[in-house]
Image (cartoon, rainbow, N blue to C red):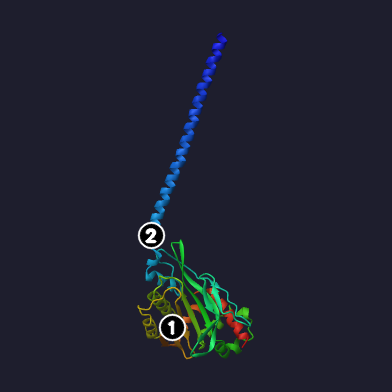
Amino acid sequence: QEAFSCFNKHLAGLQVREEHAIQMLLAKLANATLGRAWNEVEERHACNILMLAAASVIPPFENISPKMLADSMMLGKDGDQIREHVDQPYLDERRPGCARVAVPRTILPEDLTEPRTGIKFPTLLEENSNPTAEVLVGMGYRSMRIMKVKNLNLYAFGLYIQPDSICNKLGSKYATVPVAELKDHPDFYEDLLRENIHMTVRLVVSYNGLSISAVRDAFEKSLGFRLQKMNPNTDYHCLKTFGSYFREDIRIPVGTKIDFRQTCDGQLITEVDGKQIGAVQSKDLCRAFFDMYIGDPPVSVETKQDIAQNVGGLIRRC
């Protein structure tokens, strides 16, 4: 009987310890569950705070200031070189990319698409006052980045050259130079800028918040630096005249085409959706403008090299 009583006491002790262990286990599980729940609450709270902070710092895309847009489009001056302007607050300028455009050998397609923006460019650019169409030899895009969160594609661009003009001016000099070598041939780019070659840059707007004043400010700053680089004694009256054509009443919604055409007599003609808004007679201004695309440094190194290779292809067929 004493043995049976001891067994019962031992069994009761085991039950108490088991119940205590179960209670401890449940308490630990409860604490762990509450801890995870609280961590989730804290994480969500922190996430909400970050989202609110981001919303207060990043401006709405439709309210980006013209100055920010202009600065993102221009090539700023840094020391003795002209480089992309990247020191604006909340703005991380990204060097624009490009698409490699091969000049067709026989039948030209009607359009080619710039892949980043999806904007189409005609392979031939025909103009009433120009008896010979210009051929698309390169295209790319210009973008800006907001707080490393969102990329805005501002516009796509294409550069066109008249084959007859390039053949007459540079055909004999570069006919025997391998096409692949022209992209690294500095004299070739200098000759393209120096000679009165009929060529056009077409910009197609891809961002609805872009204003004509932002376009004007960007070009005035970049052209001013390049004019000074090429000729410190240049007459800046041509630049003031050029800027005066970009009137505030001109609207440039998505899809607007802005053409900048250099003629063989040294005029820089500006058109918006086929309507001429101004023309400046200045070889210096023409050279400074196209220096942005085929000079040093260019808007896009890749596009500049594509242009050289494709122009070389045109010269081979002169």
Vertical side of 1 occupied by 15: above or below: below
* Residue 271 marker: 1
Say which label, 2 or 1, has the lower sequence index: 2
Label 2: few (<14), some (14–19) or many (≥20) C-alpha neighbours in 10 Å: few
> What kind of element bears circle 1?
strand
Label 1: few (<14), some (14–19) or many (≥20) C-alpha neighbours in 10 Å: some
Q: Residue furthest top?
A: 1
> What kind of element bears circle 2?
helix
x, y (%) of residue 59?
38, 63
Three-letter amino acid code at the position of disc 1? Glu
The answer to whether one can see residue 279 in this image is: yes
Quarter of the image with the N terminus in it: top right
Q: Residue furthest front?
A: 110
Foreground pick, 288 / 243 = 243
Left or right for 305, reference 266: right
* Mark 2 vs mark 1, CA separation in Å: 37 Å
- Residue sitting at x 42%, y 84%: 275
- Closer to the camera: disc 2 or disc 1? 1
The answer to whether one can see residue 297 in this image is: no
| Quarter occupied by residue 302 | bottom right
Dot 2 corresponds to which residue? 57
| Quarter occupied by residue 279 | bottom left
Left or right for 166, reference 214: right
x, y (%) of residue 225?
42, 78
Three-letter amino acid code at the position of disc 2? Val
